[in-house]
Amino acid sequence: MGKAYKVSYKLYYNDRLKETFFHGKMTHPLYIQVTFDRQPIYFKSYYFDLFSKPRYVIFMGGKMYGPKLEEIEKLETELIEFILDKNLSEFSLDIFKKEYAYYSKDLCDEMEEKFLEYLFLFFQDEGMADLATTIQQGAKLRIVYDVVRDMKKALNPALYKKLIENSVYLAPPYLPLFGYMREIKKWPLLSLSVMEWEKQGTKEAFQMYIQKNYQDQDLAEIIQSVVNWLQRLKKESQR
């Protein structure tokens, strides 16, 4: 249970719903109940859905390995506690729902689809229509950042450089964000939530990462692109 004020919460596996496959095991979906002044709301765990995706599993020795449910519960607890502490003075269930919808979002996951669109159009423009479609469809099962990393080995240097340089202006800042996140996270919990982005020191550490790894790119342009995405997510969470 949560803290001893007017708000309480609990995580539970919703046995009213069918079991779902979660990286090698069947389980009921993880849900959250938040109660304020005896009025409850119920909703599905964002992290349960996020880490259920195929890209968060690897196969070794014929077995599947991915995030553990206990790790998902820990992430949810940290997020809920953060939102509760942030809104103690003016709490409401409506505020909580909007804050949860915003701060839970994994920035890399949010940007991935648009970045895949960029890759598709890039290779279309380069006259590689079949490769464009193959990447667009196949990358849904893999981490797109790793797909691009492998491209560095497969493409000629000039084409790869063009792909990276154009992405700064034509795609969301998925590559630098994922690269930074991978330096501070361990498999399989590869995500960077808005909550984590807002923590003290994150933006400064990200800028240092850009200056070190994207020396030929416009730092201000990349930072502004992240800010634009945050504004977009904020608007969506207020609906």
Image (spheres, rainbow, N blue to C red):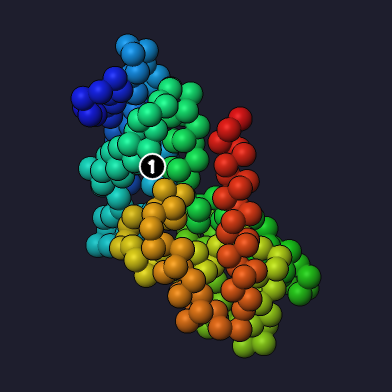
For the point 44% across and 55% down, the residue is 197
Residue under label 1, please give it. Answer: 47
Relative height, residue 143 to residue 42 (above, below): below
Residue 141, image x, y percentages = 49, 55
Residue 115 appears in the rendering = no
Looking at this view, is 191 or 198 the one in front? 198
Residue at image coords 21%, 25%? 4
Residue 63 image point, x, y percent: 26, 55
Which residue is most to the top?
38
Which quarter of the rendering shows the N terminus?
Answer: top left
Q: Quadrant of the C terminus?
A: top right
Which x, y percent locates residue 211?
51, 79
- Element on which disc 1 rests: helix
**Vertical placement of residue 31 versus 148, above or below:** above
Q: Is residue 176 above or below residue 104?
A: below
Amino acid marked by disc 1: Tyr
* Observer able to see residue 169: yes
Q: Nearer the viewer, residue 165 or 86?
A: 86
Q: Quadrant of residue 192?
A: bottom left
Total label count? 1
- Horizontal side, residue 157 vs residue 85: left or right: right
Q: Is residue 2 left or right of residue 195?
A: left
- Residue at the image point whose x is 58% and y is 33% from the top: 238
Using residue 172 as the reference point, say whether residue 29 is left or right of it.
Answer: left
